[in-house]
Amino acid sequence: MKVLWNDQIVDREAVKIDIEDRGYQYGDGIYEVIRIYNGRCFMLGEHMTRLESSAQKIKLTLPYTIPQLTENLKLLVKTEGITEGEIYLQITRGIASPRNHEFPSAGAVKGVVTANVIPFERPLEMQHAGLTATVLPDERWLHCDIKSLSLLGNLLALDQAIEAGFDDALLQRDGCFTEASASNLWFVIDGIVYTHPDGRLVLPGITKMKVLQLCQQLEIPYREEPVPVKALNNAQECFLTNSVWEIVPIVKVDGKSVGNGTLGSITKRLQAAYIAATKSSANPS
């Protein structure tokens, strides 16, 4: 298996991560997950823009330019011969010794890049049957707009949901829904699609961006505004979006069906339109 390590494509076994890498010791880094369709990286430019934004927000100087990273990711996909799959890209602040909580001064260390590609097929059964979820407090930090390596808050929420017998957690803060454990969250109420606006409480999702574009194209009314938890009883549909799963319905929340408890008509239309977009030559890598 070949992977990207800094600016080289190497055997996975050749990669050595130092014990004083700040990503390993502090979670001091950022990442992106990018879907591959027909050998192409879907919305790669948008992912790289978000990566750059996350880097700026944590004062991390990217060790390579966005064009360099882009070309190396394309080369990795080509080298591995993956036609349907995903890329995991991670950049840490780098190796600083001795261990110190302070950020190293600019230029003192160089960031470390790793990326690997794995095959992955569209989860059609999940997209049709949907998932169950429970509502939990959003106890994550207040920089959810950064795609940070520090994901313990997300993992704890997901683990709590799974231990209670659910597939996922719908997170709420101050009485309003924010996200799911690793996805943007959507509701359909009276024919209008709702999702939380971008900001420090949610990740600016790349799939979210595409779904908003599709709502415009399909003339589906939508609003970017917080949905109160108490409005869940009025929701006809609920769904999640992320780059790996695409669009997946939530059919039950805390044991109660959302709408009729099956894939909703608006969610289904958006799924079809999203799949068409992944096949379109208008989205080259």
Image: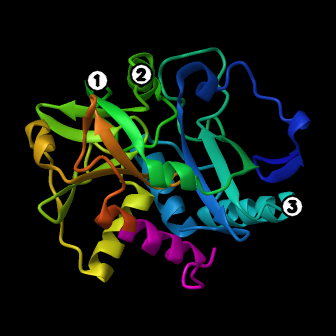
The secondary structure type at the circle numbered 2 is loop
Q: Are marks 1 and 3 in contact (CB under 8 Å)?
A: no
Q: Is residue 274 shown in magenta?
A: yes
For disc 3, the marked residue is 79
Q: Residue at x 34, y 33 (%)?
A: 133
Q: Is residue 149 left or right of residue 241?
A: right
The disc, 1 or 2, on the residue closer to the chain's N-terminal end is 1
- Residue 118: x percent and y percent? 74, 48
The secondary structure type at the circle numbered 1 is loop
Instruction: For label 1, count other residues whose C-alpha is less than 10 Å away and answer few (under 14), some (14-19) or many (20+).
Output: few
Q: Is residue 263 left or right of residue 66?
A: left
Our reading of the magenta stretch's main secondary structure is helix
Q: Is residue 64 above or below residue 25?
A: below
Which span is picked out in magenta?
269-285
The disc, 3 or 2, on the residue closer to the chain's N-terminal end is 3
Which residue lies most toward the front here?
Answer: 260
Quadrant in which the C terminus is drawn: bottom right
Query: Mark on residue 139?
Result: 1
The disc, 1 or 3, on the residue closer to the chain's N-terminal end is 3
Between disc 3 and disc 2, the foreground one is 2
Answer yes or no: is residue 32 visible. Answer: yes
Task: Name the amino acid type tagged 3.
Answer: Thr
The secondary structure type at the circle numbered 3 is helix
Q: Residue at x 35, y 38 (%)?
A: 180
Task: Name the amino acid type tagged 2.
Answer: Gly
Q: Is residue 201 left or right of residue 89?
A: left
The quadrant holding residue 279 is bottom right
Label 3 to label 2: alpha-carbon separation? 41 Å
Q: Is residue 22 above or below residue 245?
A: above
Task: Name the amino acid type tagged 1.
Answer: Glu
For disc 2, the marked residue is 165
